[in-house]
Amino acid sequence: MNIADIALFKGLSNVDLAKVLGRLERRTLRADETLFRAGDPGDGMYVVLRGQIALYVETEEGARRALTVLHEGDMLGEMALLTGEPRSATAVAAAETELFELGEETFRQLIEEHAVLSAYFIRLLSGRLTQTNARLTETREAETARVRQQASQWPAEVANAMFAAAALSFADKPLLEQLSGLGSFDAALAADADLRAMIRQDPDRAARIAVMPAVRAVLKEMYVERHGHGARAQLTHDAAQYYAATGDPAAAAALLADGGAWAELLALLEAAPALRAAGASPSAAEAAAALEAATRQPLSRGAAGAIAQRTSATAPAPRQDLPLADLLARCPDELLFDHPGLFAAYLEDCLARGREEGYVRFETALETASERFEPVQTAALYAWGAEWCRQAGRSHKALEYMRLAESLPGTEPDSTEQGLRLAREKLRDERNKRLVEQAGALLGGGRLAWLAGIVLALSGLLYFHFADPFAGLTRQGMDFIGIGIAAVVMWIVRVVPDYLVALFMAMLWVAGGVVEPSVALSGFASPSWLYMLFILALGAAITKSGLLYRFSLLALKLFPASYRGQFWGIIASGALLNPLIPSSSAKVGLGVPIARTLSEAMGFADRSRGMAGLSLTAMVFYGFTAPFVLTGSYTNVMALGMAGGTKGVSWFQWLIYALPAFLVFGGAMAGYMAWTFRRREPGRPIRREVLDDQLKLIGRWTRSERVTAAAALGSIALLVLQPLHGLDYAWVMLLGFAALVVFGVLDGQALKTGIDWPFLLFIGVAFSFAEVAERVGVVDAMSDVLGARMASFSGSPTLFLVSVVLLSFLVTLIVRDDAAVILLVVSTAGLAAHAGIHPWVLVFVILLSTDPFFFAYQSPTYLTGYYSAEGRSFTHRQGQLTALGYGLAVLLLTVACVPYWKWLGLIGHAG
């Protein structure tokens, strides 16, 4: 039996099924082998893959009494797992049987990650309660006899009026008088105290009454006995028409809902949209016409007379809202889902009223959304789910639904499933990004920190603008430094997004007369900026296609199933995937969850040494190896462009320059990680069939995957061959980008949502930053000032590079990420040139040194890895041990590679 055929997992995409499969454990039982006994702890549930499981209970005498036999696809043990109670029965294999086992922790995680599983168990519990709990009702024989006795003594007109009132959930006295021929309902009430006790008066409408619930049940039964169900349906229709014609559509809709006339109610609401508009009631004519068009049923003579009398004698009912949450609460799902507009209005009313059943129905609707709803309607459903979860305080789930609402399917046959999977990945990444930003805020997000940052930024601007120039700086140079300091402060406190700070910085350069607009925005016209655009588009295509997950599974399959084998498999797959996507965070967000899945398959508990060893190894080799290849991160090109070293450094040259460093780093980190986590818990080997089944679930290569793989590998091949064809790397990536667009892999929506446009705005100004600094003389001034104070360091390339590494570690205690790279490259580029160090060497060392994670907030890459597994794969203490090894490895490779770089001519005599 395939996992996709199990009812529990219906609704999950193939990629999600593959990930779930890696977290399940297979068990095989011999015939007559006991799985669990009554009274055992309920610490897991099972799904029968083949064979049979017999359930028994034991009598007081010790004999077994058979309950049922479960077959392929059936579940067992779920009730004890859900309720926390001990097992209520004994399970024994009736034949050789194979099962999937879900442990308690795995079960909890799957429920949190997949809403479709939550909905499944809600329905399961509801069904079990219906099947197993006997309906306990009070004995009503005496009450029934009393009501029937009184009814037999009523005059015929009074009896008819009371029977009609009981058949309806409420009724107006004029309507009852017309239907029954009673002269005055008020007079009948005045004459009979027992009759008055059976009636509840509407406090807001003097003419409206309702029969008390206990009495109504008896009288309604008597009405059906005398007139039949068809008469009651006709009465419901007549009363609804009466209220619709007399300007009270809410009453008409309520009676149809009470009578179970769902088709009429839905048709009425669809035919007259004003009936469901918040705060709007249609005219009596509009409502009556809608009901007439919906039902095509004639009115009874009494109802027609009541309508004529009411419309001529009374004013319309006051304007009111329709409580759709109440009206449609019992409407069958199949009928309601067939009216998407009404369903959406129903959900909005549930949201406004805080009705939990709206969310349950929303999850049920999502199970068949791709078959029943148009994409725009599905997007509206997700938007509603996002708002519901936001109001319920489930912000992470709200973010997931919000991102799903933005997802639109593409053009391929499997695009809907692929689009939803992509949106889930985006939302997970968005949630992690938000957590990373919160955890990485050095000064927190309080108002006092923001105020202090703004004051410091303004103080820096004003001081350097009015202070006398020094160190040979011009007035423009002084203003440039003041603006730069203000920007750095704003990047630290994060009052506004980084890209907005960068744009304001460019604006101040122009407004303050530092440089002309063409120079301030020159970064956007550089080939490096276009390269960033094209490689981000390639990354979006790779993420959209699911290639990374497939490649990772294929790489891991090549290695032994033991802990040590998968340890080396993670290292190899991280190295192979490194050039394919230019985002450390994206790669870490993939690698750490894969390592966690492998760890669970080996039986390692959360944050255990075994799980931490694999997860942190994945984090290092998926995310922290980006500087070793040109396409490993978009920051690589940004930094090299700012240092003025983009000319003459091809993809192949970058690889050759960095290869020994990678060998030193990889060997050092692999040895360090193996030694640090050597005393791990015993684990079991991964079943080879798990990886095979995961690959089978992903299925054959889609057209999108084939095109994306060809574009990525073709682009890398052209980058490697750049010395032969001489085409700039930006234009090479343009060819790959064009292929993705022409073959339909990247459409307009993918370009809008898959590319980090705020980062491109930031990076464009960053490229301009170096040009402006050079133009106003800041680079030369900084080189002169720092050169005199660092003469001893400049005389030794090794000492200079080591000092750059240590300085980078210190700077990232305050300034992180790209801002730290910009600051360090601009401030040290001139010194490196004087020391005879090629810009690539300086940039490479800075890139490796500006992402340390001695403290969690220092590194966005580390935080992404931590939160991609929701903090359950490793502790911060384990992360700090890894950070120590990382820092030592960076220092080691820096010292070890100096002779090699000298041999290549990248380090020479000071200039």
Image (cartoon, grey):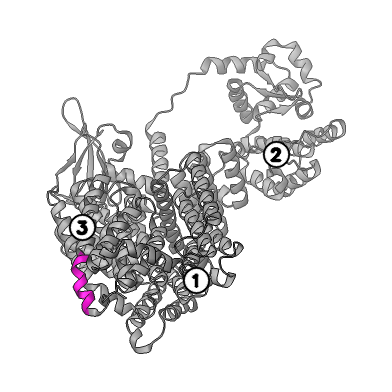
In this rendering, which labeled residue sits more in front, label 2 or label 1? 1
Give residue 237's mark. 2
Give the residue furthest to the right. 312
Residue displayed at 39% across by 38% down = 125
| Picture coordinates of residue 107, whole percent (x, y) | 31, 44
Give residue 888's mark. 3
Residue displayed at 22% across by 61% down = 891
Residue with the mark numbered 1: 775
Q: Residues within 10 Å of mark 2 (few under 14, many from 20)?
A: many
The CA span between labels 1 and 3 is 38 Å
Task: State which quarter of the image contains the C terminus.
Answer: bottom left
User: N-terminal of the two: label 2 or label 3?
Assistant: 2
Q: Picture quarter containing residue 186?
A: top right
Q: Is residue 190 visible?
A: yes
The residues colored magenta run 893-903
Q: Residues within 10 Å of mark 1 (few under 14, many from 20)?
A: some
Residue displayed at 28% across by 43% down = 105
Assess whether mark 3 and mark 2 are in contact (beta carbons under 8 angstroms).
no
898 falls in the magenta region: yes
Q: Amino acid at mark 3?
A: Leu
Q: Amino acid at mark 1?
A: Arg
| Picture coordinates of residue 887, whole percent (x, y) | 24, 56
Assess whether mark 1 and mark 2 are in contact (beta carbons under 8 angstroms).
no
> Callout 1: helix, strand or loop?
helix
Q: Is residue 578 visible?
A: no
